Amino acid sequence: MKTALLQLNVTDDPAKNLPVTLRMLRDAAAQDAQFVLTPEVTNCVSNNRTHQRDVLQSEEEDITLAALRDEAKSLGIWLLIGSLGLKTTDADGRFANRSFLIDPSGNIAARYDKIHMFDVDIDANESYRESAGYRPGDRAVLGQTPFAQIGMAICYDLRFPALFQALADAGAQILTVPAAFSPVTGAAHWHALLRARSIETGCFVLAPAQTGTHASAAHKTRDTYGHSLAIDPWGEVLLDAGSAPGVYFFDLNMELCAQTRRRVPSLANRRPFSNP
């Protein structure tokens, strides 16, 4: 099955980003992609909480979600919206970082809220407190499609292998890891972590990413690593998109999951043990 990863360089203006994403989605479908994936925070890249309160919307009102659902229906494709920043009704005013699996009728087949918040001090010049603006999810999610069961994750989740083991145990054959990865940690760990999650589970790992310097009208800009990856169940890299925005294609052969798990049945061979 022909599949496409959209590598985006979005701004902090959802209305400005949407036409670019729609155009790339149509380009992917025009080249026969049947499953298309977008990165984390497809609607808006911003670290400014005041600005986010001004431009983000609730799930019911979000212009990006509505337009991408309509477009998936029009094109007759499966679409993973890597994530959207969305307003919630939480008393503390925090947002949700939510991924959506959209079916070819435009329906939401599954939704997942990012569990692990990126609260880190990378170096003296780069720190993040995702939990200050976003509230964590608390539930792992498996999306059902005719071609595979899809385990949904987002960005920093990648560093927590127990989540991916749980998804594989539940039947996942594809793991999705849309991201807006830091350039520093991306260069050091992105490829290694994604290949490890694939090898450990015998799953395809599909990781569409934000890339480059993200324009901001009035706030500090942010850089992301790019290098959207597609990795097969043996840990082989099928696609590395590099650093340029664009639409990137590869083929999914779902028979590889069963073949790989027969060769190295690590999921079946695990044994219980006592903690030290």
Image (cartoon, rainbow, N blue to C red):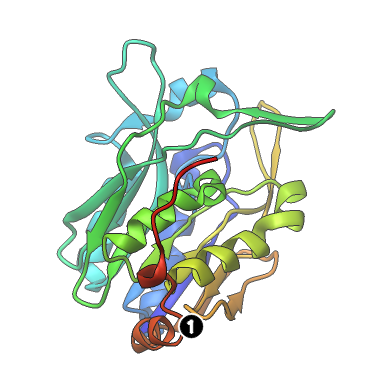
Q: Quadrant of residue 244?
A: bottom right
Query: Against 30, is 51 above or below?
Result: above
Q: Residue 227, percent across and down?
A: 65, 64
Q: Amino acid at mark 1?
A: Phe
Which quadrant of the figure contains the N terminus? bottom left
Q: Residue 160, percent across and down?
A: 52, 47
Q: Quadrant of residue 74?
A: bottom left
Residue that badge 1 annotates:
250
Query: Against 96, is 69 above or below?
Result: below
The secondary structure type at the circle numbered 1 is strand
Q: Is residue 238 left or right of residue 93?
A: right
Residue at figure coordinates x 41%, y 84% from the top left:
31
Q: Which is more toward the observer, 124 or 46? A: 124
Q: For residue 37, say whether it is visible.
A: no
Q: Is residue 29 left or right of residue 218?
A: left
Q: Residue 264, percent across and down?
A: 46, 81
Residue at figure coordinates x 35%, y 54% from the top left:
166
